[in-house]
Amino acid sequence: MKIIDAVHVFFDYMRKDENDKIEEISPALSDMNLEIEKGSFVCVLGHNGSGKSTFAKMVNGLLLPREGSVYVADMDTADDELLIKIRETAGMVFQNPDNQIIGNIVEEDVAFGPENIGVPTAEIRDRVDEALEAVNMTKYKDRSPGKLSGGQKQRVAIAGVMAMKPECIILDEPTAMLDPKGRKDVIRTVRELNKRDGITIVLITHYMEEAVDADRVVVMDGGRVVMDGTPREIFSRVEELKALRLDVPQITELAYELRKAGMPVPCGILRKEELEEVIMELLFEGDKGSCDSTDTDGTEPDLGTDGTEPDLGTDRPEQDLDTDREDKSEGACQ
Amino acid sequence: MSIKAEGLTYIYQAGTAMESYAVRDISFETKDGEFIGLIGHTGSGKSTLIQQLNGLIKPTSGKIYYNGEDIHSEGYDMKRLRQRVGLVFQYPEYQLFETDVLTDVKFGPKNMGMSDIEAEEAAKRALKLVGIGEDFYKRSPFELSGGQKRRAAIAGVLAMDPEVLILDEPAAGLDPLGKTEILETIARLHRERNNTIIMVSHSMEDVAEYADRIMVLDDGKLVYFDSPKEVFRHYEELEKMGLSAPQITYLMGDLKKRGLQVDDSVGTVAEACREILRLWKEKEEKSAE
């Protein structure tokens, strides 16, 4: 089932002079199409100005398409009457936690949303407790948000959205201002909300590492989707990503460089553990392999003494490459 | 061009019940033309520390020497210090306010007392350094892209020709290429002009790549001040402080634990690549024998 459906969406930012005359039009989305399945974890990548944030604001009706439509759980965002329902369905978390927190104490802040839409008091209590529990911030409920770290504030902001009982949360660079631990905590929280509570997650980020665990990675450029696939598929396309001002995770980059230098490393490696296994196999168990192969190769060295040995050296890794690739892709599916 | 701190301590709301230490007894000395990475969790005192280095806030106790002179001594020229030690805040593009890029960058040098013509020359030099061409001079700062705005804002500080440049998370919020552009610009300034750089960052990968030495703050205390290799060797302690080592360092650490003869203190892709390829070539040669 689709939770978000953007159909041929166009949007322009307009600059007007004092007399309301349009001075300049800059297109932000042009023919953007994107369907997002309910319950999925989708990561949206793209350089500054590629249209990611504009798209995010379309999803909860902060901006409306000039042409085309955006549907949230089959509700058209252009329908004024549905706006509140849409915003309850799809909540947003922005980059700067300080701009999103208004309460003097944490639980008050989380209660703001449900209070605002007239949820009965007793239910607000439950919702706030549940939301704080979901982001693992219960023990800070009586604190002043000002005293929290960036990552904690951001989790309070997420709790604020959770208290609205959304089906979907769109996070626009939620970790851009956080330190490594804060970043890790926020991403872990988001992943839990997805896996445990089935909340659809749309994560916009510039940290390629954060896309590794998504079900799907969507790359935007020039206001439309230009790449769409699993993290492994997308991060195998290193050159294309770099041409789009993007990058790949450090581990993927290292695997790519090793491969370029002639090591038979499969492409699209995402995680440290995977690369570790590949390297160990090639460098270590490879020795074991050559021991084993002395039996099978036993006849070959006789041939090789005529000076075919260098060939042997280069041929072998080629063979390894194919078998390795299969091994790895299987391993990755587990 | 060295900054020396001696027993630097800064207490917010000192003498009240709300008293809290932001910086505790920090001592260090920078070397001329050094690139320093400053890391630490949110609230570890990074921003408080750097604001003390150019005299924006005065330490509760302790001393700061710039080129051997106590900056809080009687009659010290603070204005001159702020010109020599340039500070680029987080999200500096929020501080762009003039009607066009050139005028904005001119503001600093003019404020320093330069004539309009001198200031304009200084501004043009600075914009060139950060890679913003003439066609942008007359544009509104708000028409620039995120990365361009950031560079224009940095130019505003560079126009004052500082000897030391302190930057608070200069790459935060930029896309990967924008980030690389900013960091390369800073690295180039460092190489070409031998500026001392102090760069606050939350990206361990970036400090591993660029810094000669890394300063690690935890709860206001200076815990490490050493080469990236030495600092990232302590990755377990770093994690306890809410930090980490670059992903690559973990990989190399694991490979070493599993018996590969690799240097486990490397923090960049290029270094790791060299290490692994070295072993790979050795093995290839062996199997060719």
Image (spheres, coloured by chain):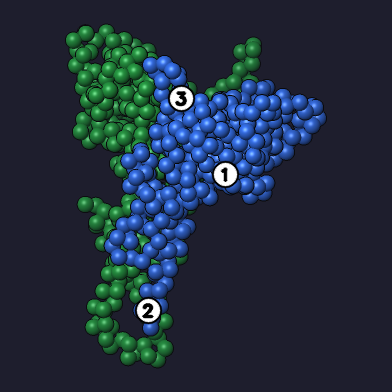
Chain colours: A green, B blue
Marks 2 and 1 in Cβ contact (< 8 Å): no
Q: Sequence-wise, which precedes: disc 2 or disc 1?
A: 1
Q: Using the image, name the chain to which the residue with label 3 belongs.
A: B
Residue placed under numbered mark 3 in the picture: B11
Judge from the rendering whether residue B153 lies leftward or rightward of residue A2; answer left or right.
Answer: right
Mark 3 is surrounded, within 10 Å at the Cα level, by few (under 14), some (14 to 19) or many (20 or more) other residues, namely some
Q: Do the residues labelled 1 and 3 touch (CB within 8 Å)?
A: no
Q: Which residue is drawn at 27% across and 8% down?
A: A118
In the rendered image, residue A238, in percent from the top left (x then y), is placed at: 44, 52
Tell me the residue at 66%/26% (across/down).
B74
Label 2: chain? B
Residue B263 in the image, given as x and y percentages of width and height: 40, 61
Please state the horizontal and vertical placement of residue A220, each as a whole percent of the image: 45, 38
Q: Which amino acid does label 1 sit on?
A: Thr
- Do dots 1 and 3 share one subunit? yes
Q: Is residue B155 visible?
A: no
Residue A125 is left or right of residue A100, and the answer is left
Distance from disc 1 to disc 3, alpha carbons, whole Å, reads 23 Å
Instruction: Residue under label 2, please give it.
Output: B286
Callouts 2 and 1 on one subunit: yes
Kind of residue sitting beneath label 2? Lys
Question: On residue B30, which mark appears?
Answer: 1
Q: Mark 2 or mark 1, which is nearer to you?
A: 1
Residue A200 numbered mark, or none: none
Q: Distance between the residues labelled 3 and 2?
A: 62 Å
Circle 3 SS class:
strand
In the picture, residue B157 is in which quadrant? Answer: top right
Specify the amino acid type for callout 3. Answer: Ile
* Residue A75 coordinates in the image, percent (x, y): 31, 20
